[in-house]
Amino acid sequence: MASAESNRDAVSPEERITLEAYEINGLFGDEELTRIVEFAGQLCDCPIALVSLVEEHRQRFVAKTGIDATETPRSMSFCAHAMLGHDVMDVGDATQDARFQDNPLVTGEPHIRFYAGAPLVSKSGEALGSLCVISPEPRAGLTDIQRQGLTVLAEATMRRLEARRVMLAHRAWENAAEADLAASEERFRVLADAMPQMVWSTRADGYHDYYNARWYEFTGAQLGRTDGTGWNGQFHPDDQAKAWEVWSHSLATGDPYEIEYRLRRFDGEYRWTLGRALPIRDDAGNIVRWFGTCTDIHDQRIMREQKELLSRELVHRIKNIFTVIGSLLYLSSRGVPELKGFSSKMSDQIAALGRAYDYVQPREGAQTLTLQGLLGELFAAYNLEGIERIRIRGDDVLLAETYMTPIALVFHELATNAVKYGSLSSPEGFVDLMISGSSEQLRLEWQESKGDSAPPGDHQGFGSDLIRLSIERQLRGTFVREWLPRGLKVTTTIPYRLQAA
């Protein structure tokens, strides 16, 4: 067995395992240690055997046989000497040993004469005590087998002590972890209860096991009544199935939970509420908990619905204005033949404005304002027996509403001219419109084919003024006409920061 001093030099002070780590008060009467000392006494033919652990001022016998005492002062301890050695220390006759001849344990009970002790040393090299055998009769010493056996039993004693130390350390770690968890949970509860929102949490399987104080204040539910799946009963009957469907989807997929529903308040009123939740995952990616909130959005929801109602009413009235203006133009031109062409053109322009305006207005459900969507509706009237005569290709881009009306007017003008003078004036004619959007600009190429080609300078006037006003002045873009053999080509560029649709 290595000496305590040699082992101790190999570790830092923080790593040393001292006697305190074993909590020796809990070792008295330990069955395994008792069996060890009984066997040691029989092996060495000694009536007394002890596991003696040496403290600063005393030695304590945590396991013993053949003696009633449980401790003695350290000044009387034989083991305090034995534990510092490299091997078993034996004393043949204590009355002849200058270290012990005046020791009260020699001059008085139990009248020690023969002593043999194997050192007990911790893993870090700290001397703890010894496993010893004692006899009131002097003797020459231990046999080789007895010496070897005492050493083996001392190693077994240390294994028992080490197992206890590890168990105590693990228990202390668990207690500390539990204390940290309890403190963390308490901090969470204090924080959650202080929040103006309703906060809730569930197990990984979706079982609701926590609600903050705000939930109980709002719903008036008794503590624990909404645990598990009881929360669904707080929802409006018309919203329960949908809420359960969305929550089940989140549990199955791990997707964030979000839904609007009507939640019953303590006074019986149902209030629109926004429910949200996110999963908490461990290092392996497994969901361990869900944390969610419920936010009262009733007032905002009512305001939004009122705003949508007002917006729909406003759209309806503005569309009526377009219709009224078109009718006035028609009626005003009936008696003035020379205004008939102008009136018809203006009516078409107003109708195009109406379609563009209707396209960009808010509608129920999600709506994406895309250029292809706008132009597709605008050109639908030019299709011939289901054949698409103005073929839109290229990028579909998101546009701000301020771009919609000018572009609608310009391309309505081009389509009208194509019907009167260009490729759409014959059934075989087509138009290809290529749209390309970069991060800096929008480019539109209008190419007519299989139709009459008007020479430069023809058909200029109101339409040209409209194009210049819409593209060049309002949108600060460019508009270039080219009369090619196959038909009119128009290239329009508009500066704009675009998003792909």
Image: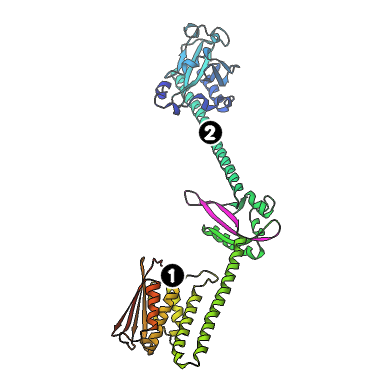
Q: Quadrant of residue 2?
A: top left
Q: Nearer the viewer, residue 220 or 118?
A: 220
Question: Mark 2: which secondary structure?
Answer: helix
Magenta stretch: includes residue 224: no
- Quadrant including the N terminus: top left
Which residue is denoted by mark 1 in the rendering?
Answer: 399
- Foreground residue, 15 or 326? 326
The residue pinned by badge 2 equals 167
Pointer 1 or 2: first along the chain: 2
Q: Is residue 349 above or below residue 1?
A: below
- 205 or 182, nearer to the observer: 182
In magenta segment, residue 295 = yes
Q: Which residues are magenta?
A: 268-296
What's the distance in space between the residues labelled 1 and 2, CA to CA? Answer: 69 Å
Say left or right for 52 vs 144: right
Q: Is residue 37 above or below residue 374?
A: above
Helix, strand or loop status at disc 1: loop
Q: Is residue 179 visible?
A: yes
Give the x, y percent position of residue 146.
47, 19
User: Which percent across, then down, holds residue 495?
Assistant: 37, 69
Name the amino acid type tagged 1: Leu
Marks 1 & 2, CB-CB < 8 Å contact: no
